Amino acid sequence: MRVLILGGDGYLGWPTAMNFAAAGHEVCVVDNYLRRQIAEATDSEALIATPSLSERARVFHAVSGHTIKVHIADLADPGVMFDIVREFGPETIIHYAEQPSAPYSMRGFREARETFNNNLNVTFNCIHAVKDIVPDCHIVKLGTMGEYGTPNIDIEEGWLEVEHKGRKDTFLFPRAAGSLYHTTKVMDTDLLWFYVRTFGLRVTDLMQGPVYGLSTDEADLDPRLCPNFHYDDIFGTLVNRFLVQAVAGIPLTVYGAGGQIRGYLNLRDTLQCVGLAASNPAKRGELRIFNQLTETFSVNQAADRIKKVGDEMGLNVTIKSIPNPRKEKENHYYNPAHSGLMELGLKPHYMTDDVITAMLKRVMENKDRIVAGRIMPRVKWS
C-alpha cells in the first residue's frame, strides 16, 4: 500500500513508519515538530535524544534498506494537506498528527487553544482531502480510551445499542472526556462519523489506552531509531514515568488514591493493531471502532508491579501518594470490551516481569540523562 502517516515524528508515528516500510509498503510521513517544540518550551524533552525526522529516515535506510519519504510541514494548513495527499495518492492514511498531552491542554488558554486548533484542523483537513482527492482511501485514526471516561457500565467498542420506550437503535457510546485534549478526540470521532454517513468515507477509529515501552524490531536496529521516550508530566505516560522514577530513586508518584483503572498496551502491540486495521480496511460508509488495549490495571497495581521487579534488581523502589492534580474518579468501575482486534489476529505482549525488567535495564543505560525536575506534576486542572 501507499501509506501516509500524519504525525510521523511522534512516539507512535515513527515506529509505525518504520514498521510499515519494513513490511514492504510505500511510506510517506509528515510532521510539523509541534511535540518537539512543546517539549523544549516546557522542559519536557525525551530521555534519549533523537535525530531529526529526516536524519532518522536516512539512518533507517542505511541499516534496513527501506525508504521513508519525509515532509516537515503543518497539516493544519489545508493547502499543505491537500498538496501532500494529491502528490502521494495514499491508499491508507494513519492519523497521529495531534497534540497528545492532556496536561498541556489544561495548562492555560494559549495551550488549550493551540491543542484545539491543531487537532481539529488537522482532522478536518484530512477528511476533506480524502473526500475530494482519494475518496476510497482508508483513514486509520488514533483515538483514545480517554474519550469514554469512566462510566458505571461496561464500555463497548464504540457503539451502544439502546432500548427506549419499546424501540431500539444504535448510537456512538456516550463520551465523558477528562481533559481538553481528550475532548478534541471526542470531536474527531463526531466529525468522522458525520462524513462517513454523509459521504461514504471508510474510517477505523482506534480507541487506544496508554502505551508503554521503547523497543520494536526496527527501533532496535540502531540506537538513533529509538522512539521518543518521555517520562515527564507533560508527555510521559504512567508506566514510562514509573520506570524512570524507579531507576532515579524517586518514589513512584501515585496521584490520589491510585484506584484509577485504565487499559494499557505495549508499543509493539500498537504497531500490530495499526497494521491489522490497515490490512483489513473498513467498508465504504463505515466508521469501525476498536478499543485498543490488551490488559487493564490500576495505578496502584502498576506501581506495585514495577516496585516488585525493581526491588529484585536492587533498585529499592518506594511508592508515594500525592494530591491528584487532575479531576477524575480515583475509584471506579472499568470494564472495556476489546475483542475486535483480537479477532483480527492481535497477539498481545503483556506487561510481564520480564518485560518490566527489559524496560528498566534500557532506562538504566540512560540514567545520567534523567532530569528529576521534569517528573512531578506541574499542571493542575483547577
Image (spheres, rainbow, N blue to C red):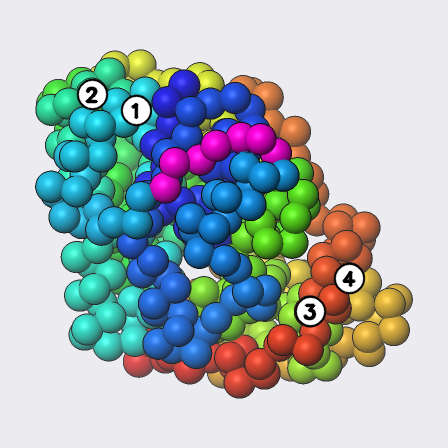
- Mark 3 or mark 2, which has the lower sequence index? 2
Rounded to the nearest angstrom, the CA distance separating label 2 from label 4 is: 45 Å
User: Which amino acid does the dot numbered 2 rest on?
Assistant: Val
What residue is at 37 percent from the left and 61 percent from the top? 35
| Residue picked out by circle 2 | 134
Q: CA distance from mark 4 to mark 1?
A: 39 Å
Q: Position of residue 9 (x, y in %)?
A: 42, 50
Locate residue 131: give its quadrant: top left
The structure residue drawn at horizontal position 61% and vertical position 34%, both measured from the top left corner, is 64
Q: Mark 2: give few (<14), some (14-19) or many (20+) Cα within 10 Å.
A: some
Mark 1–mark 2 distance (CA, rounded to whole Å): 7 Å
Q: Position of residue 36 (x, y in %)?
A: 39, 64
Q: Which residue is mark 3?
A: 366
Do the numbered discs 4 and 3 sit on residues whose CB atoms are within 8 Å?
no
Task: Pinpoint residue 21: horizontal percent, then vertical percent.
Answer: 50, 29
Mark 4 touching mark 1, by CB under 8 A? no
| Residue matched to label 4 | 361
Cα–Cα gap, marks 3 and 2? 44 Å
Seen in the picture, residue 243 relative to 81 is either above or below; the reply is: below
Please name whichever residue, 96 or 145, is drawn nearer the observer in this view of the structure: 96
Residue 56 can be seen in this image? yes
Q: Quadrant of residue 101?
A: bottom left
Q: Secondary structure at mark 4?
A: helix
Q: CA distance from mark 1 to mark 3?
A: 38 Å
Tag 1 and tag 2, C-beta contact below 8 Å: yes
In this rendering, the answer to whether 293 lies above or below 278 is below
Count residues near mark 4 (Cα–Cα under 10 Å), then give few for <14, some for 14-19, many for 20+.
Answer: some
Checking the image for residue 90, the label placed there is: 1
> What residue sits 32% from the left and 20% below the top?
91
On the question of residue 322 being in view, the answer is no
Q: Earlier in the sequence, mark 4 or mark 3?
A: 4
> What stretch of residues is rendered in magenta?
64-70
